[in-house]
Image (cartoon, grey):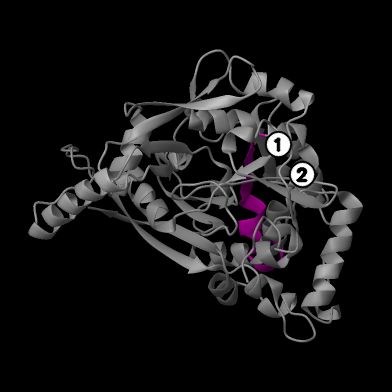
């Protein structure tokens, strides 16, 4: 079974909603008089301080009052009924896995850190997008109980959170344990903004990103057919001030061009088979022209660029969706655009309909993520990069969520009476990515 949204596939799909006058008002703040790149449109639709989705719906991330006692539930039906009741009572948009499976999900991450951390220096952890603070509290609880006292006493945990409302929730959550308070702080800022980080941190540290990559801004490129050149996609506001349209320009943006190169999208070969393939594509493009659309994780590239610069010895743990079912938008790595009201989910078939009222989240191409990680660390060189700068080697591995939990967690804690385990059985489309420096120079 696949997890369709941030929870589970029991949420029904409703029909398309019409834009209300209030939504039209918000749309004027998402895009101004000048066209913007798709990534800037998505950033505004999600993070605009007044009109973005996460600003308008600070309660969209749910907090469970109590830990779910899975061993007291009979099986999947009982579990789904339990969740349905919680959602109806709170009208929360979603509960993250770290919330649903607290404290066990965070404990597994803490165990992964403890197995490889260098305890000869103080343990430093950064979490990007800490949600309700449940992950931070769970990790700090685990280290307090299972690590040597000096490790807990000297550790620091910094949450970098763009939402002021969620930042306050995190302080309250972690503050439930008094000894955590002096070790924990929230910095309310954009983690992808280099200016917010200050000086380079030369000590080893850990960076945690749980369901962050899916909400990072992406760019869109477009080609008229199979052989035409890729074009940047921009969004512009129509004369009615309520609707948007796409505008296509030659590729010039540096983030977009670097993403294309890292993905090797325009790779060329002089082999005979490639020449034949090109000729066939040329014929097909004339007989049956097929437009191409490709979504690029430029927000991920920008974020990892900054992180590798300011935290050159960081170890990274990221978890996210590798696949999203029921996506209505066209294009490779297209997002799911969805909103929830009164317990029902509505999916849009056009990302430009998200005007601060809908979540926009993307599947993560973990192969692409690894290439971006190696590129930002200096290990992967682009075709035109002839610099003598030596990159740092990194050990990377991508694991299914079930494999990660079986290795580092306690799966028995999330198992129901009949053996059903939602953490292992319902998150088949999520993965963990681990990346650690080897301290060797190429």
Are circles 2 and 1 on residues that touch, CB within 8 Å? yes
Position of residue 334 in the picture relative to residue 339 (left or right): left
Position of residue 421 in the picture relative to residue 91 (left or right): left
Determine which quarter of the picture holds residue 312.
Answer: top left
Residue 65: in sight, yes or no? Answer: no
Question: Which residue does the image show at 17% across and 50% down from the upper left?
Answer: 278
Mark 2 sits on what residue? 60
**Whether residue 153 is situated above or below residue 420 in the rendered picture:** above
Report the span colored magenta: 144-162
Horizontal and vertical percent position of residue 332: 43, 50
Horizontal and vertical percent position of residue 384: 18, 37
Mark 1 sits on what residue? 54
- Name the element at disc 1: helix
Position of residue 256 in the picture relative to residue 141 (left or right): left
Horizontal and vertical percent position of residue 65: 87, 57
Q: Residue at the bottom extreme?
A: 418
């Amino acid at each position: 079974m696949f997890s369709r949204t941030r929870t589970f596939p029991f949420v029904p799909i409703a029909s398309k909603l019409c834009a209300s006058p209030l939504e039209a008002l918000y749309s004027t703040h998402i895009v101004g008089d000048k066209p913007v790149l798709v990534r800037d449109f998505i950033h505004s639709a999600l993070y605009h301080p007044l009109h973005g989705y996460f600003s308008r719906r600070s309660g969209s991330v749910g907090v469970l009052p109590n830990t779910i006692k899975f061993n007291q539930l009979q099986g999947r039906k009982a579990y789904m009924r339990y969740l349905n009741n919680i959602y109806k009572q709170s009208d929360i948009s979603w509960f993250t896995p770290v919330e649903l499976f607290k404290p066990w999900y965070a404990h597994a991450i803490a165990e992964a850190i403890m197995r490889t951390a260098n305890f000869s220096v103080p343990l430093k952890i950064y979490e990007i997008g800490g949600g309700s603070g449940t992950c931070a509290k769970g990790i700090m609880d685990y280290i307090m109980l299972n690590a040597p006292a000096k490790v807990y006493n000297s550790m620091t945990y910094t949450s970098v959170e763009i939402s002021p409302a969620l930042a306050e929730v995190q302080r309250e959550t972690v503050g439930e344990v008094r000894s955590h308070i002096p070790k924990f702080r929230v910095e309310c800022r954009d983690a992808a903004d280099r200016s917010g980080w200050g000086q380079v941190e030369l000590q080893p540290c850990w960076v945690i990103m749980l369901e962050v990559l899916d909400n990072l801004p992406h760019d869109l490129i477009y080609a008229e057919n199979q052989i035409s050149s890729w074009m940047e996609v921009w969004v512009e506001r129509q004369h009615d001030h309520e609707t948007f349209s796409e505008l296509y320009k030659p590729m010039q943006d540096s983030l977009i061009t670097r993403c294309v190169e890292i993905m090797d999208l325009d790779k060329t070969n002089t082999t005979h088979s490639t020449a034949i393939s090109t000729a066939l594509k040329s014929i097909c493009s004339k007989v049956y022209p097929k437009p191409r659309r490709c979504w690029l994780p430029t927000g991920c590239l920008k974020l990892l660029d900054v992180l590798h610069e300011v935290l050159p010895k960081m170890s990274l743990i990221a978890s996210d969706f590798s696949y999203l079912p029921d996506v209505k938008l066209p294009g490779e790595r297209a997002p799911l655009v969805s909103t929830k009201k009164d317990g029902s989910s509505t999916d849009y078939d056009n990302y430009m309909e998200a005007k601060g009222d809908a979540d926009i989240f993307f599947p993560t191409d973990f192969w692409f993520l690894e290439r971006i990680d190696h590129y930002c660390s200096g290990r992967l060189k682009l075709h035109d990069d002839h610099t003598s700068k030596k990159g740092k080697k990194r050990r990377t591995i991508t694991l299914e969520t079930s494999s990660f939990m079986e290795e580092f967690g306690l799966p028995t804690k999330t198992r129901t009476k009949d053996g059903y385990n939602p953490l292992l059985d319902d998150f088949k489309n999520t993965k963990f990515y681990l990346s650690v420096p080897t301290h060797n120079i190429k």
